[in-house]
Image (cartoon, rainbow, N blue to C red):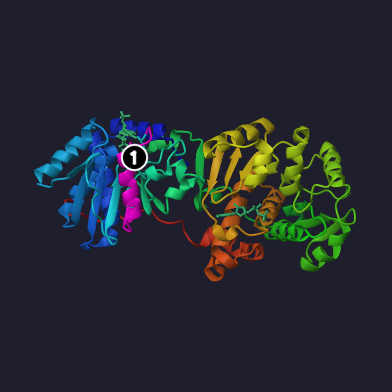
Amino acid sequence: MKVFTAQQIYNADKATIERQQISSDELMERAATQIFNWMHLRMQGAPVKIHLFCGIGNNGGDGLALARQLWEHGYNIAVYVVKYSEKRSKDFLTNLDRLKDRKIWPVYLDADSELPSIGPDDIIVDAIFGIGLNRTPDDWVSQLIQHLNKTKAFILSVDIPSGLFTDSVPKDSASVIQSNYVLSFQVPKLVFFLPQTGIYVEQWEVLDIGLDTAYLMETETEYELIAKNEVLQFYRPRTKYSHKGTYGHSLIIGGSYGKIGAVTLASKSALKAGSGLVTAYVPECGYQIVQTSVPEVMVLTNGESLIEAIDFEIEPTVIGIGIGMGTEDKTVKALEKFLKVNKMPLVVDADALNILSKNQNLLQFLPKESILTPHPKELERLVGKWKDDFEKLKKVKEFSEKQNVVMVIKGAHTITFFKGRGYINTTGNPGMATAGSGDTLTGIITGLVAQGYPSLHAAILGVYIHGKSADLSIANKGYQALTATDIIESMGSAFIDLFTSPEKEAPVEVETNEN
Ligand SMILES: NC(=O)C1=CN([C@@H]2O[C@H](COP(=O)(O)OP(=O)(O)OC[C@H]3O[C@@H](n4cnc5c(N)ncnc54)[C@H](OP(=O)(O)O)[C@@H]3O)[C@@H](O)[C@H]2O)[C@@H](O)CC1
Ligand SMILES: Nc1ncnc2c1ncn2[C@@H]1O[C@H](COP(=O)(O)OP(=O)(O)O)[C@@H](O)[C@H]1O
Ligand SMILES: [K+]
């Protein structure tokens, strides 16, 4: 699913109005109807108090149109107009008149108003600011937002939590609605997925408001959201007359005394991802450990307790390198020498990344389309500090383009970057914040490259399967007890899940009295 910018959404709006020959008011009505349907389906006429806070732009207009529809179906509503500006949008005014025609009188809020009283079991509809927010709200609006956040009421945001910008991090966290659920029109917004802005969104869902399909299909976006349908497009099925040679040979290089487990986890993951053969390259102290823990994996050794040279006679299809490897001088020299002669595709992680960060002249030796999988600290060492998430994305994009590598930026929503585009993963959970889960990812991606997946596809599918495996594991492990080994054990189920359970369906429409 593409992730559009605010400007692209406004353009889609315009294209829809022109091509479908509808008015902007009709489009607003569609948007409000979708939200009404969503609420009505769940509330079934329950007499819960619904407080609708509406701004004076089109987000507020959506809120007013929704208030009318709720009222027409007998819901218990209170409408507030948050007068943060003297300007009012045309469709806001149209919908305000429609409320007045029905003798529904909103409460007007300004800097001098008392804060409304809201019960813990009430519902708040947040339609104060939408994607038009372009500056930090005034103090009194921030105070209202803080007041709403403090209530125990469920907050449903229209399109985006009010106070959240679409293209920057809010300066003042107190001026953003802490939303329980966001109903986003047609497309999700990038800020739902970044660590500094995603925190305002507990859950989100897109509502189809029938924006022009041709515009949506033709418009190129910088970001794409990756769910099941997206990865299925490039999944490579196994064929009947294939053999282990068909599925490549992964070489996992890493480990040092006390950190052999990392290589064990990665090697096992490469196997479970479907690699035909897997060899681990570890110091001698790891020989028995790897052989005993994963009998399917072959083992090569060098050095006693750390890798001193990287030299082998096998011909792997791909090499995953760096996990648990350490950054001792001998290992640094070994990596340097190896990179200067290596021609094989690489998946670079952990200490190999740390060594590259300190010796940036080595970056030139990475084969093109190598995959780098830094966690936030490793990324900082590689590209330098960033002031916020948006600067981080910019730096990563530039780095990936300059070095011609696939960058996998690990986090709650891992984003894979390549050739100027970012692919945002939707699987995974906080249980994955556990030792070794990154080693597992390195193994999975390596195992996919071994089977012939192009680098970008291996990274995107690998990240998806890694997160999905963890999601399937938590059913009986919970977040706290989840380990990297559990993730590996669920990989089979994650692959099967690609074909068994369909992706979540589009929202169900409900008949209203008016149609
Ligand atoms: N295609 C779609 O998806 C559809 C979208 N629709 C809906 O439209 C929403 C976008 O509406 P919108 O453009 O009118 O902007 P909105 O967010 O209501 O803000 C209003 C105005 O406030 C102003 N302003 C900004 N910041 C401010 C501040 N801090 N303090 C004070 N004022 C501030 C700024 O005006 P300015 O003062 O800068 O001229 C801004 O224009 C969208 O989120 C969705 O809900 C649907 O109706 C139909 C289809
Ligand atoms: N809160 C979270 N939600 C989803 N995924 C997470 C979360 N925290 C960590 N992860 C995932 O777990 C992995 C952790 O990797 P990393 O930090 O390299 O672990 P390690 O070095 O212990 O192997 C990454 O793939 C990351 O995306
Ligand atoms: K909103």
At horizontal 35% and vertical 51% (from top left) the residue drawn is 149
Q: Give the amino acid type for the residue marked by disc 1 in the picture.
A: Gly
Task: Please state the horizontal and vertical placement of residue 341, each as a whole percent of the image.
Answer: 85, 38
Q: Is residue 107 visible?
A: yes
Task: Please state the horizontal and vertical placement of residue 338, each as a whole percent of the image.
Answer: 84, 41
| Residue 174 sits above or below residue 503 on the image | above
Q: Is residue 34 left or right of residue 367?
A: left
At horizontal 58% and vertical 49% (from top left) the residue drawn is 411
Look at the image and say whether residue 436 sits in the magenta stretch: no
| Residue 507 sits above or below residue 161 on the image | below
The 10 Å Cα crowd at callout 1, few under 14, some 14 to 19, many 20 or more, is many
Observer-nearest of 423 and 313: 423
Observer-nearest of 142 and 450: 142
Task: Please state the horizontal and vertical placement of residue 32, each as a whole percent of the image.
Answer: 26, 46
Residue lying farthest bottom?
476
Task: Please state the horizontal and vertical placement of residue 253, each as a whole percent of the image.
Answer: 79, 51
Count numbered badges in the picture: 1
Q: Which residues are magenta?
A: 134-155
Q: Is residue 225 left or right of residue 154?
A: right
Looking at the image, in which quadrant does ligand 2 appear? bottom right
Q: Secondary structure at mark 1?
A: loop
Mark 1 and ligand 1: say if the CB distance to the nearest ligand atom is below 8 Å: yes
Observer-nearest of 183 and 431: 431
Look at the image and say whether residue 152 sits in the magenta stretch: yes
Q: Which residue is mark 1?
A: 130
Q: Is residue 419 visible?
A: no
Q: Is residue 515 left or right of residue 382?
A: left
At horizontal 33% and vertical 38% (from top left) the residue drawn is 139
Q: Is residue 9 left or right of residue 406?
A: left
| Residue 93 sits above or below residue 106 on the image | above
| Residue 199 sits above or below residue 9 on the image | below
